[in-house]
Image (cartoon, helix red, strand yellow):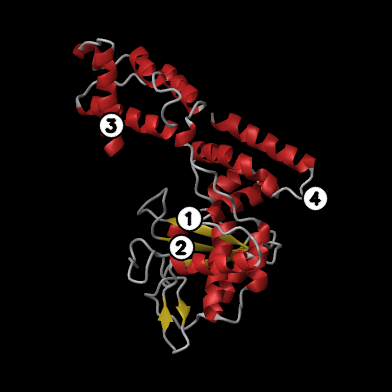
Amino acid sequence: RENYGAGLLRFHQFCDEYSISEHQRMPASEHLLAAFICSWIGKVASTTADNWLAGLHLWHDYHGAPWNGHNLVRRSRAALSKHVPESSCRPRRPPVTLEHMHTLYQRLDLSNSFDSAVFCIACTAFWSCCHLGELLISSINAFNPSRHVSRSAPLHHRQTPNGISFSTLHIPWSKTTLSAGADVIITKIDDITNPFTALHHHLAANNSLPPEAPFFAFETVDGGWAPMTRPWFLARCNQIWRDASLLELSGHCFRIGGATELLLRGTPPDIVAVQGRWKSKAFLDYWHRIESILPLFITGSFTDARVSLLQSSIESFSRQYK
């Protein structure tokens, strides 16, 4: 990666500035690595520092040298992450909220095959905490069966011992598992945006598609079909939200919103992590990003006690996976 090479360059520049000899640079001592990272506090984003360290680690591995980036380096990296320059901070992505979802239900025409597909995608992305790239293609000619879910994908409908219906849809690729694929869990919930019902409605409204078609393709008025693309999906959602005087949003906002809504409903953090296919550390990092958007979700139905319980469950989860 480009940043890997940049990290190696910055490290050598740092060593040159402080007259660090060549033999002291490899293997670099933990104190030297920590000093290098600390020299960039307040100057670069933590992701940049992480990429630089990864590049240095790779450089050591390539030359068969031991890597000393342990506790002191981790503490230095943590200190850097608390002093990120404003220029490196991306604006927080606002989430899709339940109000956005209910507005889609109320204003989409669910007798229309296109809108039925849009609603199913929205419900699945929100409640199953999916990346849109795991469900949709970027353009009409971009479909790749090794990367995109098709109508022939394994889809199973089941019921838990206590009577809760759910479906599992196997996708051939995910951001976390790559080509190993993953199972998306689509559970029947007590809400008008219930993804289990939306899925069955989409399959019924678009029941003439060939098995090689993208899973969320839709039937057209001329008797054919067309693949649903990410731009078409987002354009339709944002048209609805704009007409309802709601904030227009991007695709990633569904995953953020769904995870937050599930947590506020009392779903245990480890279950939400599984639903969104996060690893424990990644989920904790994710939680720190969505803490700041909680006020957008908290209404009269979410009391202070509920929010306090949520914070306690996250703290317990954090202790478990530290």
The label on residue 135 is: 2
Amino acid at pointer 2 = Leu
Residue 26, quarter of the rendered image: top left
Helix, strand or loop status at disc 1: loop
Q: Nearer the viewer, residue 16 or 96?
A: 16
Which residue in the protein does label 3 denote?
Answer: 6
Q: Give the class, few, some or many, for how many residues have Cα within 10 Å of label 1's Cα (few <14, many ≥20).
A: many
Q: As drawn, is 135 to the left or to the right of 289?
A: left
Q: Measured from the top left, where is residue 111 in percent x and y?
A: 60, 82
Residue 167 visible in the displayed image: no
The label on residue 46 is: none
Q: Earlier in the sequence, mark 3 or mark 2?
A: 3
Q: Nearer the viewer, mark 3 or mark 2?
A: 3
Q: Residue at x 40, y 23 (%)?
A: 40
Q: Measured from the top left, where is residue 238 in percent x and y?
A: 56, 65
Q: The N terminus is located in which quarter? A: top left
Distance Cα–Cα, label 1 vs label 2: 7 Å
Amino acid at pointer 3 = Ala
Up the image or down, 192 lies above or below 91; here it is: below
Q: Earlier in the sequence, mark 4 or mark 1?
A: 1
Distance Cα–Cα, label 2 vs label 4: 33 Å
Q: Measured from the top left, where is residue 163 in percent x and y?
A: 69, 63
The label on residue 300 is: 4
Q: Nearer the viewer, residue 163 or 263?
A: 263
Disc 3 to disc 1: CB gap under 8 Å: no
The label on residue 131 is: 1
Q: Earlier in the sequence, mark 3 or mark 4?
A: 3
Amino acid at pointer 4 = Gly
Q: Nearer the viewer, mark 4 or mark 1?
A: 4
Q: Nearer the viewer, mark 3 or mark 1?
A: 3
